[in-house]
Image (cartoon, rainbow, N blue to C red):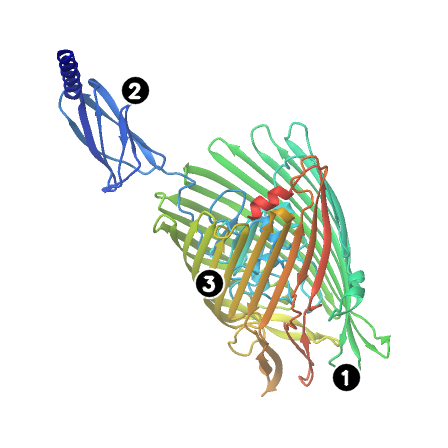
Amino acid sequence: MKTRQQRLLFLITLLSFCVSYAQVKITGRVTFRNKGIGEINVTLKGTYDGATTDSNGKFSFETSEKGNHTLSFTHPKYNDIEKQIVIENQDISLDAELKEQINEIDAVVISAGAIEASDRKRATALLTPIDIYTTAGADGQISSALTYLPGVQKVGESEGLFIRGGTGTESRIFMDGSLINNYFSSSVPGIAGRDRFNTSLFKGNVFSSGGYSALYGQALSGALMLESVDLPDQSSYDFGISPIFLNAGFQKLSGDKNHSYGATLGYSLLSLMQKVLNFNTDFIDAPQGFNGDANFRIKTKSGGFLKYYGMYDTNKMGVRTESLEPGSDYALVRINGKNTYHNLSFKQKFGKYLLNTGASYSYNRSDLNFSGETNTIETDKTQLLTDGNYINFKAVLERKINKISAVRGGFELNSTDEKLKFEEVNKHYQDLISSVFAETDLGFSNEFSAKIGIRAENSSFLNKSNIAPRFALAYRLAKNWTTSFAYGLFYQNPESKYINGPAHLDFQKSQHYILQVQRASEGRSLRFEAFYKKYDQLIKVRNIANIENQNQPVQTAINNDGFGYAKGLELFWRDKKTFENIDYWISYSFLDSKRDFMNYPVSLKPNFASEHTLSVVGKRFIPEWKLGVNLSYTYAKGRPYYDIATKDINGNVVNFTRNEGRLKDYNALNLSFNYLPNLGKKDAKAFTVFVLSISNVLGTKNMYGYNFSQDGSRSSAIVPPINTFVFVGAFISFGVDKTQDAINNNL
């Protein structure tokens, strides 16, 4: 027995010795730019033999294979390589140098001055349509939601995006690449117009607070690029009701899912809320409006896309305020506005080329009537009537160079035809701005990229041309850390409403310098941005007439001698990960700006610019209650205000500051609730969302500025139409359950 065991042990030992003798050890090191890299799969092709590199790039494994073989090195972030080896009886040692795989998802993105939110899943996406709807105080408006991001000022008395020390008219808004003229509804002095476009029309946006692409122009401060939705998932019918509005719409998707069409109708009236809430503004005619839109979308057999969107709306209101001038108790102003907008876009690939074309047409009519009232008797009305027709056409041809590099170019035509009538002033303004542009995205690696562009414009009215170079760089500092730098030169025509007489005018000009550092990881985003803007050739104006009892001067541009600057620091932090079912962000902006433009007598801090702005937004969804709770808070340091008048000095009319000061700080806490009763019901046929929103919950009495009498002896505060507003509404969708999407996208 013992002898048999000894023989068995001897055979096992002999066999192990033979096997070990037959195996060959293969070792080496894998590097990228002379640094060892881990997690590289090293495999002897056609066998199960191989290993994975350690953190220093080293690997080691044994094989019993013999003869000619192929050793492969693979990793998702690097190009695969193979090495031919001959396995005999000696150990093998070899090294491999990998090259980075150029990948669109892994490549660093240039984001200086830009905040992107779209259906493309990038970590830099910060603001989606669902974010807008669930931001308390935004009222579902894109422009209002943007005021909770860094760089955008809260200016409640006037519509527009006031970006980094720029006026509301120094920003432009585009839909599928085409310019939207008159994005906001017509308004009366002291009350801002609202967005004309439904947020749900767009699947995403790119908001640039500076340094934007050469494909866009005529904006000194920033641009908002909106991207409309493609085909709906399925046919649906929607209905919305509240004490303020009533609307309904549908979207019909074809059976082959290659085309769709739809339409909506809506009507709004504020009179019921006037009876319930205490308004600061005395509306003699309650704000009311009618709107309707229609669309169709066609997907071609070759993968192209044709989209059309058209809309029409009207808005009316009348306001009574205490008169600041003698001889009248009250000042009255009424607005009757009409607007239509049509957008047609086409996208198609032709081999290696992508063609994007778009055309838009809009017509806007603003009929303002001013009058006085004494002892309930209204005086004769003074009319300020503006009619405008606007046509925009753009074509862009793009060619991919590789996965992360491309070159594109094209041209744009922007036609304006406006007529203005006020007392003895009759104006017919016409201009055609012709533009050509070229731009290239250069991806040198996944860590380093650049964007270089140039834009040239010619204005038929000014009879002048300009050339605007722009470039940006981005570099990945570490795994989640990137830095970007952007520079650009930007031009914009003087506003047509100030061109009321002969003047040799030129383009207004600004230069942007932006440095950004960003950390983006799953569920969290942190952004620091520093910027400097230099303004030149801003227009200066003088008064040519005054509208009775309203102290609203009609002004005319006299030259381009204005100038200014804006500089600042911004911080944005968003966190969806730390707390379960909680999404929050914090935004802070510091702004130092001065301007000598319009009727300013000297260089002054603009009356629309706040030095410090802080916003905090929080969202909490409670699944067991099917309830979303949203909070937002905004603080802004009080803005300056000025009463600028004229006087005659030795025959020269000069401007001077008659009254000035600083407003009290702005504070507003907003709260909203979203209740989704059909959440989780698989057999539900209708999907409803109930909304309760309360703006300025604490009832803070905020101020936007002052109006002054013509002699400066009297003044009145410009305040919001209401201190605290309560909105209640229900939104019902038949056919498509959007509630779960809302929660998934929000949290």
Residue 606, given in percent of the width and then of the height, sits at 55, 72
For label 1, the residue is 326
Does the residue at mark 3 contact the one at mark 2 (Cβ under 8 Å)?
Answer: no
At label 3, the amino acid type is Glu
Residue 331 placement: quadrant: bottom right
Q: Earlier in the sequence, mark 3 or mark 2?
A: 2
Q: Earlier in the sequence, mark 3 or mark 1?
A: 1
Residue 559 placement: quadrant: bottom right
- Tell which tag, 2 or 1, sits nearer the viewer: 2
For label 2, the residue is 46
Q: Where, quadrant-wise, is the N terminus in this rendering?
A: top left
Quick one: label 2, few (<14), some, or many (20+) residues within 10 Å? few
Residue that appears at 80% across and 83% down: 327
As helix, strand or loop, the secondary structure at mark 1 comes to loop
For label 3, the residue is 570
At label 2, the amino acid type is Gly
CA gap, disc 2 to disc 1? 98 Å
Residue 54, given in percent of the width and then of the height, sits at 26, 38
Residue 536, given in percent of the width and then of the height, sits at 48, 67
As helix, strand or loop, the secondary structure at mark 3 comes to strand
